[in-house]
Amino acid sequence: MKQSAPFLGLTQVLERVRGTTSKNEKVGILAEYLAKLQPSDAEVAARVASGRSSERGSKDEAQVGYSTLLDVLREATGATEAEVSRTYLRHGDLGEVAEELLAEKKEQTLFDEQLTLAALGDAFAKLRSTKGQGSTSAKKGVVKSLLLSASPLEGKYIVKVLTGEMRTGLVSGLLEEAIASAYGLSKPEAARAHMVLGDIGVFANRAARGDVSGVRIQPFRPVNFMLAEPFATAAEIAEHFGRTVYAEYKYDGIRAQVHKSGRKVRIYSRRLEEITSSFPEVVASLQGARGDFVLDGEAVPFEGGRPLPFQLLQRRLRRMEDFEAAAKKAPITYFAFDILFRDGKETVDLSLAERRKHLAKVVAGTTARMAETVDVSTQGEIQAAFRRSRDLGYEGLVVKDPDSLYGMGKRGSGWAKLKEELDTLDVVIVAAEYGHGKRAGVISDYTFAVRDGDQLKTVGKAYSGLTDKEIDEMTEKLKEITVRDFGYRREVKPEIVLEVAFDSIQRSGRHDGGYALRFPRIKRIRTDKGVSDIDTIEKVEKMFSGQKLKVDER
Ligand code: AMP
């Protein structure tokens, strides 16, 4: 086998990719580089370029926490805590901090051994397999020896991958194109192989071997999920399809791909991570089903014929309690809405109507259920189905074309989703923080409050919705009205009013108002309003009790 290529070469290529905004150039630079690599190197390079250190779908991640990385950076470079945090504030990116600190220190070190892609891949594998007691210090050792043998540029990319913050503008589609161009695949060929293999590295490896034509869906290789396109109104959905289609409840749970072969069942999340151990009931419910299959559906907290609040799932996912307790508090039902593979054959190229027939056969006799479907065609029928769904405690509708194929990884026009936006609230900013990454050096995270008599009570924190220019102006303004400066956080005089939209309201101990807005986004800066015009905690309470689902976040 050829010698593995140096990692330095990849980092230089990634710098060039970052340096251009032209998508074609990004693709061209990367394709030229990949074409020269042997398959195993292409695998590591493509994965790193996508910002990952481990294969998608693998149960173990090589990622290392911020605080561990900060420790290692100090140890490897001799920088003090204050130096590290000063450098961090300047860049807002730990990779760039690593580069700067390594550059300062590297003058006195000589390193003769070059880090290869194979060695990097091995180090990531070691991080993945290091678990249990003492794993933090073992991981530190691995990262430290990597950083000690790395040039500043290599150090930067090692840290970027380990924090999952690549920011090269290389979205997955561009990487896929680069691989296609490097190895002479057509775009559809590449797209399909990538979807089915799930992981960009595995895909690059197969492409470099000239072996993508035989790629097929198979159990225990998660594939990317089909996504729905958002629509604002029932009328738009009726017009979009223009015929009789299926309306399904939109279940508020966790998207889950269930794979079964023999008696073995594994479950994968939307990010293609294995989450089998979080859902023992789903395993139990499908273990006895006939045949082998890959299903798509939603794991929903569900009891007495009704959905329970989604938040009840979160503790379980964060592994904060044992499953017996979790299962009692929020028993899960798996609502299957699609099938991608059955008994040795892919079903993704069948129509949804055909796929549902297969699905019904697989689910029959198990405690898993099929998503409920009603036929709708007019705006009125869609609206009525939507109302019914909301009344029963579901989130809305996903409307599907019975003739559509399963578009892996696509936000295709075959599925349309309809959700209800709640009202907006007018709130005032009471505290703010500096952002990260692209937002380093600007104050972009805003804690906001509503009125409670003559006091202010916080109910959330918003990060999104403003343009860069607005954030710059906001930063200047917030500096001017700072009451107390804690470094990266400031308390400010409550005078900037925001109109925020959000998905729902939950009870929360995190804010002194006792509630938190879920997924708040800034709709507008209300320069026309002052603090006396903002909404009250009574209004928040009223909206909360008007919600179909009441959520307690304990
Ligand atoms: P959203 O998370 O709002 O973008 O909506 C898309 C998500 O709705 C999907 O990723 C699924 O997790 C979820 N979902 C719930 N019910 C269905 C359904 N019947 N069909 C498809 N997706 C559904």
Image (cartoon, rainbow, N blue to C red):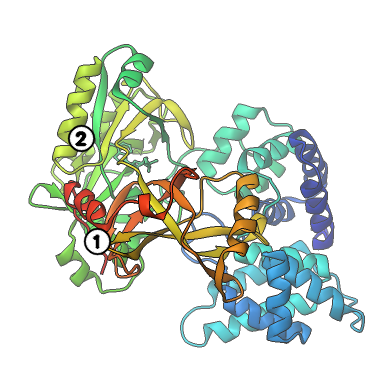
| Image location (x, y in percent) of residue 324 | 19, 71
- Residue type indicated by callout 1: Leu
Out of 459 and 31, give the one closest to the viewer: 459
- Residue name at image x 53 percent, y 66 percent: 61
- Residue name at image x 85 percent, y 81 percent: 105
Q: Is residue 266 visible?
A: no
Out of 5 and 166, give the one closest to the viewer: 166
The Cα atoms of the two marked residues, 2 and 1, are separated by 31 Å
**Which corner quadrant holds the C terminus?**
bottom left
Query: Toward which corner of the image does residue 290 lie, by quadrant?
Result: top left
Ligand 1 is located in which of the four quadrants? top left
Q: Tell me, for residue 361, which label it has, or none.
A: 2
Labels 2 and 1 touching (C-beta < 8 A)? no
**Residue 101 left/right relative to 391:** right
- Residue name at image x 7 percent, y 51 percent: 304
Out of 520 and 365, give the one closest to the viewer: 520
Q: Tell me, for residue 312, which label it has, or none.
A: 1
Are there few (<14), some (14-19), or many (20+) residues within 10 Å of tag 2? few
Q: Is residue 159 above or below residue 43?
A: below
| Image location (x, y in percent) of residue 365 | 13, 43
| Image location (x, y in percent) of residue 475 | 62, 57
**Which corner quadrant holds the N terminus?**
bottom right
- Residue type indicated by callout 2: Lys
Out of 232 and 50, give the one closest to the viewer: 232
| Image location (x, y in percent) of residue 545 | 17, 51
Q: Secondary structure at mark 1?
A: helix
Q: Is residue 481 above or below residue 196?
A: below
Q: Tell me, for residue 503, which label it has, or none.
A: none
